[in-house]
Image (spheres, helix red, strand yellow):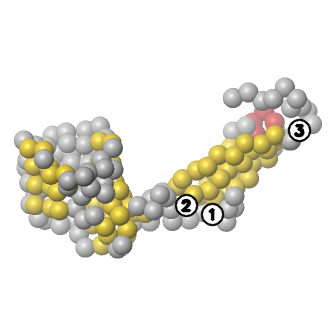
Amino acid sequence: THLPISVDHTKDKIVWTSSDPDVVSVEYETDFEYAMRAKYKVLTDDAVNVKITCTIGKYSATIPIQIDGKKEVTSNDYTYRCKSDGTICITGYTGEASKVTIPNQLDGKNVGEIRGFEENEDLENVEIPKSVTEIAYSTFYDCTNLTSITFEKGSKLEKIGLRAFYGSGITSII
């Protein structure tokens, strides 16, 4: 982007701010040449929505940022982390079942994304609930005995990451 022509590089200062500085801080240089590059630092493990604002003289622009939680939670045979949209992402499976029905919810939160099943030789059949909108990169990578995936009727799946099923033995998708 370009700065407005009325911005005076010698007088106008660039200031970056966070809508919640206790959760996300913004680090930047005060020298005008380098101040256009800012870094934000997340100060929590929780999922948050914040706004970062850049002000130059009398002009400002605000950027909304969604940050997914870093803290992993264990529930039954699954690990997950909270996402900034209120859903959760399953990040791992510790069970040994050959037929797995991924839950629609864990701990009262909708499952929106799945990942973390790679190289699981126990898996043969997986049922995916309609709440899942994304199957991430390499989710079922090298699950050589996985032959069947069943999507719940009314599936809201929007995205399948690269190599999500690479190296699996899938012969049936329902």
In the rendered structure, which amino acid carries the disc numbered 3? Asp
Q: Position of residue 78 (x, y in %)?
A: 27, 66
Residue sitting nearer the eye, 61 or 122 = 61
Work out whether mark 3 precedes mark 2 in sequence or the reverse, and give the earlier one.
3
Instruction: Say how many tags the image has.
Output: 3
Work out whether mark 2 precedes mark 1 in sequence or the reverse, and give the earlier one.
1
Residue where numbered disc 3 is placed: 12
**In this view, which residue lies farthest toward the front?**
154
Q: Is residue 137 visible?
A: no
Label drawn at residue 170 = none
Q: Is residue 138 left or right of residue 5?
A: left
Residue where numbered disc 1 is placed: 23
- The quadrant holding residue 77 is bottom left
SS assignment at label 2: strand
SS assignment at label 1: loop
Work out whether mark 3 precedes mark 1 in sequence or the reverse, and give the earlier one.
3
Q: Position of residue 65 (x, y in %)?
A: 58, 50
Label drawn at residue 48 = 2
